[in-house]
Amino acid sequence: MALIANKRSVMTLFSAPLCPESHRTRIVLAEKGITHDVVDIDPNDLPEDLIDLNPYNNVPTLVDRDLVLYNARVIMEYLDERFPHPPLMPVDPVARARTRLGLYRIEHDWYGMLGELETKSDKKASAARKQLREQLIASNELFGAAPFFLSDELTLADCSLTPLLWRLPHWGIELPAQAKAVTAYAERMFARESFRESLSEAEKELR
């Protein structure tokens, strides 16, 4: 594995153009201005490089010299520690723990719906859309409590939330007026230059 990784002199991210998990790692790379290559892959036709590097044969997969990482959360935390400026996790241990708990809930509750949102089963997709919409509406106050998600500074939680909010129209989810704080938050995130840089061509076409 190390020999394969060493062939790449620039940090490389194997990424699927429409994958939210890949997207949130691309946002972190853009926020930190890290020089990197992106290898766009077709999840149904994986390149041999990726199969050799990652035993789970999935994306995102990051190659940094002789280091190979998979799992979006692991990659994001590595990038934040490897390139500490700007920091994307609070310095204070209590605030950091709260951000990690927020990340866990985002991943467990919302990223956990991705399979059903993208399924060909109309019944399952409809139920997932309804559930996600209702949970976002119920979380409206959280999105309005600070400039970023429960924080005065951008964190990994924001990098994880924004890809989901960008895809709401694609999933057929329209937020009502009572979720105006969620909508305002989303527009602030979408306006960031780093977010625009993170978008694949396929993602740009989702809106």
Image (spheres, grey):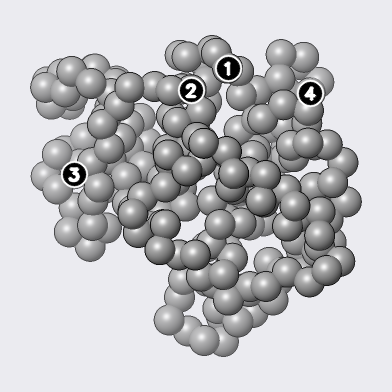
The image shows residue 156 at horizontal and vertical percentages of 60, 33
In this rendering, the answer to whether 193 lies above or below 123 is: above
Give the class, few, some or many, for how many residues have Cα within 10 Å of label 4's Cα (few <14, many ≥20).
some
The amino acid type found where label 4 is placed reads Ala
User: Which of labels 3 and 4 is toward the front?
Assistant: 4
Residue named by callout 2: 32
Give the class, few, some or many, for how many residues have Cα within 10 Å of label 1's Cα (few <14, many ≥20).
few
Mark 2 vs mark 4, CA separation in Å: 21 Å
Mark 1 vs mark 3, CA separation in Å: 33 Å
Dividing the picture into quadrants, the one containing residue 60 is top left
Q: Earlier in the sequence, mark 2 or mark 3?
A: 2
Residue 51: numbered disc: 3
Mark 2 vs mark 3, CA separation in Å: 28 Å
Residue named by callout 1: 86
Q: Earlier in the sequence, mark 2 or mark 4?
A: 2
**Residue drawn 59% across and 44% down?**
191
The reply to whether discs 1 and 2 touch (Cβ–Cβ < 8 Å) is: yes
In this rendering, the answer to whether 180 lies above or below 161 is: below
